[in-house]
Image: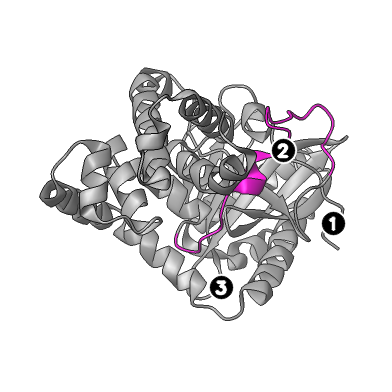
């Protein structure tokens, strides 16, 4: 069997890779569990020279296969598809589970294993959907794990030269998202940014609840965009909403329907400030905010599909 020390040492890296490949915590955890179990039963383990690279290859190939089989399911998805949020509450992880929330098969929350890198924020995860499965794998292996092209070639079964071209093509597709991520990362101390972002997010929600349309519009970039994901299970905007006036009107509308009532808590979502709305002990919305160079809200991602909130666990740090 695979010894506990080895499993624990590679688990964060493997879950992080699988999550970034798939955008799903549950699927990432299942793939890593299966890969580690298969590896522990392998009769050729003693012949493996580079254990980390071998496990990364196992997980990457499983992710590629799953993305291929899930393509049709994604086409039938109702409305906009957003990655499942990997949520950590302010003040750390390890908080008690919320009512009705799902436990990980390994006894821990897979979101707690996700490694935070400023180059792979939630905004970037959304933009990774622009890539093909192979482009995504090559980009992540090179950008986040610093694998050389020969190593990547052995994983995706392409030549090193081809992998270099694939990586270049992927970077071109992600150029806009990377610029946003770098712009946000360049603004001062991370903790100060988070505190300011959470305070700003709370002020935005409060402005919607009080019907202060002018404040909402002033807090939004002129080309602000809202994307919401209800998965056909809760009411959500089917298409993205663009423009400060339209986004503000949307929030004013849902506020009038009491859709923003509940407890707001500050969270880290894949290394990016956000908020979770909790109602009667159940998380009902996770909102992630992106900012422009003038500290205005340029992007809002609202995840409401209950299946994608099943790993969200409660913390004790409320926005105040």
Magenta region, residue range: 96-119
Q: Earlier in the sequence, mark 3 or mark 2?
A: 2
Q: Earlier in the sequence, mark 1 or mark 2?
A: 2
**Residue 267 horizontal side relative to residue 270, left or right:** right
Magenta stretch holds residue 104: yes
Residue 145 image-quadrant placement: bottom left
Which residue in the protein does label 3 denote?
295
Residue 207 image-quadrant placement: bottom right
Secondary structure of the residue carrying numbered label 2 = loop
**Residue drawn at the location 55% of the way across and 27% of the way down:** 30
Residue 231 visible from this viewpoint: yes
**Residue drawn at the location 87% of the way across and 53% of the way down:** 316
Magenta stretch holds residue 192: no
Q: Nearer the viewer, mark 3 or mark 1?
A: 1
**Residue drawn at the location 42% of the way across and 19% of the way down:** 73
- Residue 318's disc is 1
Q: Nearer the viewer, residue 317 or 152?
A: 152
Quadrant in which the N terminus appears:
top right
Q: Position of residue 123 (x, y in %)?
A: 48, 53
**Residue drawn at the location 77% of the way across and 57% of the way down:** 206
């Amino acid at each position: 069997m695979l010894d506990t020390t080895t499993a624990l040492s590679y688990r964060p890296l493997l879950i992080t890779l699988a999550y970034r490949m798939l955008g799903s915590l549950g699927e990432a955890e299942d793939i890593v569990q299966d890969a580690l179990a298969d590896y522990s039963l392998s009769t050729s383990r003693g012949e493996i020279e580079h254990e980390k690279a071998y496990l990364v290859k196992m997980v990457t190939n499983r992710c590629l296969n799953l993305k291929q089989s899930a393509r049709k399911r994604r086409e039938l998805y109702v409305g906009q598809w957003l990655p499942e949020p990997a949520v950590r509450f302010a003040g750390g992880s390890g908080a008690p589970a919320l009512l009705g929330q799902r436990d990980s098969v390994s006894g821990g929350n897979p979101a707690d294993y996700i490694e935070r890198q400023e180059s792979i924020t939630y905004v970037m995860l959304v933009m990774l959907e622009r890539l093909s499965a192979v482009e995504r794998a090559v980009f992540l292996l090179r950008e986040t794990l610093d694998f050389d092209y020969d190593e990547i070639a052995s994983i995706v079964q392409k030549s090193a030269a081809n992998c270099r071209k694939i990586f270049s093509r992927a970077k071109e597709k992600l150029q806009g998202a990377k610029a946003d991520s770098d712009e946000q990362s360049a603004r001062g101390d991370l903790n100060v940014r988070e505190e300011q972002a959470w305070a700003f997010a709370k002020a935005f929600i409060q402005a919607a609840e009080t019907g202060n349309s002018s404040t909402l519009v002033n807090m939004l970039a002129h080309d602000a965009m809202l994307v919401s994901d209800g998965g056909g299970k809760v009411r959500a905007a089917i298409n993205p909403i663009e423009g400060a006036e339209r986004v503000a009107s949307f929030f004013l509308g849902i506020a009038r329907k009491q859709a923003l009532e509940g407890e707001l808590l500050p969270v880290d979502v894949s290394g990016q400030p956000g908020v979770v709305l909790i109602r009667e002990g159940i998380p009902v919305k996770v909102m992630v905010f992106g900012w422009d160079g003038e500290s205005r809200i340029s992007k809002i991602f609202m995840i409401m599909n209950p299946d994608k909130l099943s790993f969200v666990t409660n913390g004790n740090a409320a926005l105040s």
